[in-house]
Image (spheres, helix red, strand yellow):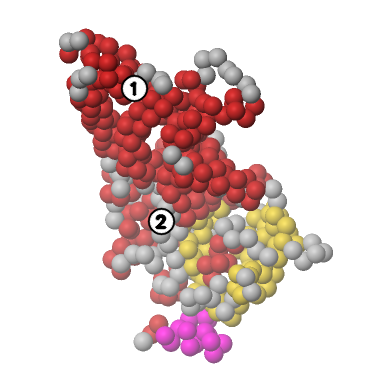
Amino acid sequence: MSLQTMINTMAGGMLRTMGIFFLTLIGSLPLGLVVMFLEKRKNKVVSGITKVFISIIRGTPLMLQLLVWYFGPYYLFHISIRGYRFPAILIGFIVNYACYFAEIYRGGVESMPIGQYEAAEVLGYTKAQTFIRIILPQVVKRILPSITNEVITLVKDTSLAFTLAYSEVFSLAKQISASETSFMPFLIAGVFYFVFNYAVAFVMARIEKSMQYYR
Amino acid sequence: MILEMKNIKKNFGSLEVLHDISFSVDNGEVISIIGPSGSGKSTLLRSATFLERIDSGSISYMDEEAVSTGEDGKAHYISKAELREVKNFFGLVFQQFNLFPHKTVFQNITEAPIIIQKRDKETVKKEAIELLRKMGLEDKKDSYPCQLSGGQQQRVAIARALAMKPDILFFDEPTSALDPELTIEVLKIIKSLAEEKMTMVIVTHEMNFARAVSNRVIFMDGGYIIEEGDPESVFGNPKMERTKQFLRSYEE
């Protein structure tokens, strides 16, 4: 198998890796906000359950979670769903990353000076208006470096989808390497992850820079 | 009567910080509240602006009762939505300015009148320009708060409060975070507002300013109003020993 053929065979895997990456971000960034709100609820039951859930998600390997999401419905309820592989991967990634993002959001929200809330309150802002117009835009700026960290980790974590035999770039590299007895597929995968992350870091740096207009 | 507070009691845990305080403000009055730290003067102001919940007593703005106390002796607040309406009657200027750092000076001033009060955009913008001119900041319209000095930030904060067209303006130690030079520029603005008969209540440690600008001075200590009256009698001829002692500490 020539290098060109290898790259062509792996190109589909690269697209699938990017699919997991973007869909996970689209799902988990907003879901993280929901999880944070649940965690910050005054209702002790709701916030307690959310805290326990977050600690389970953060305390167990994502690889294990993927297996649970995929095989859970069958072993627990004897349900088998056709075409469930990719949805299971997405659920696993989105839930996992949402919990990490929720904690980052919470840190950002709690770092806001109380004066910002009070100024908005006296001006007659509702709680929702205060959050959307005053708090959230400032929180985004504060937490962006931590978000960048998570996003870069996510690029590499997508390789965990191989656990469920999903043919993203890492699974393909393993397969081709075994069948062709070649080291080359791993190099190609490595270069792909690195270049992808380089682009991600570049974009995130641009976003951070666009928020430098105030301190 | 713009503001009427009656029999205000406020505890922080087991510590009572306001003991049965009654206090009212008439149209056009400029009132200074002085007193040592921890005397309850800031808490009184924060209670008047609903940032602190009182335990009992009543608060009315323009004869609209926002907080009342019934038979059970506990303070009852009107609903959050009704409270937001009452907030249109007053503005508050903070010690730490509390401008919104991600918005320009102009946005800081115009957002609440447009979004919250839903007033006509063009009118609000025109008024904002006029307010900035009055504050001597017309060239800072598009600056961000971090690009301004403390004194300029506090003047923006005053403009932001005035843009809501309040009937009464509260100041919570407006110059305590400023050095003496910047203090003067803020005090000048407050003085010019007093000359325009803006109703104001000012918690301050600037005794000379309080004496010069206000028509009533209230001295608080330990959660009580110890003495109140026109500035000449409170500063020139205080009756209570505690007041004399406090004022003496400023002369040294």
Rendered residue at 30%/22% (across/down): A174
Q: Residues within 10 Å of mark 2 (few under 14, many from 20)?
A: many
In the rendered image, residue B85 lying in the magenta stretch gets the answer no
For the residue labelled by badge 2, is the local secondary structure a helix, a strand or a loop?
Answer: loop
Eye-nearest disc, 2 or 1: 1
Total marks in image: 2
Q: State the residue position of label 1.
A: A171
- Please give the range of residues in magenta: B230-249
Q: Position of residue B150 (x, y in %)?
A: 32, 58
Q: Are the residues flagged by discs 2 and 1 from a single subunit?
A: no
Looking at the picture, tell me which residue is in the foreground, B137 or A166.
A166
Rendered residue at 36%/60% (across/down): B186
Residue type indicated by callout 2:
Phe
Q: Is residue B139 above or below residue A65?
A: below
Q: Is residue A194 above or below residue B188?
A: above
For the residue labelled by badge 1, is the local secondary structure a helix, a strand or a loop?
Answer: helix
Rendered residue at 62%/21% (across/down): A79
Q: Choose top left, top right, bottom left or bottom right for residue A74.
A: top right
Q: Position of residue B105 (x, y in %)?
A: 36, 44
Q: State the residue position of label 2.
A: B97
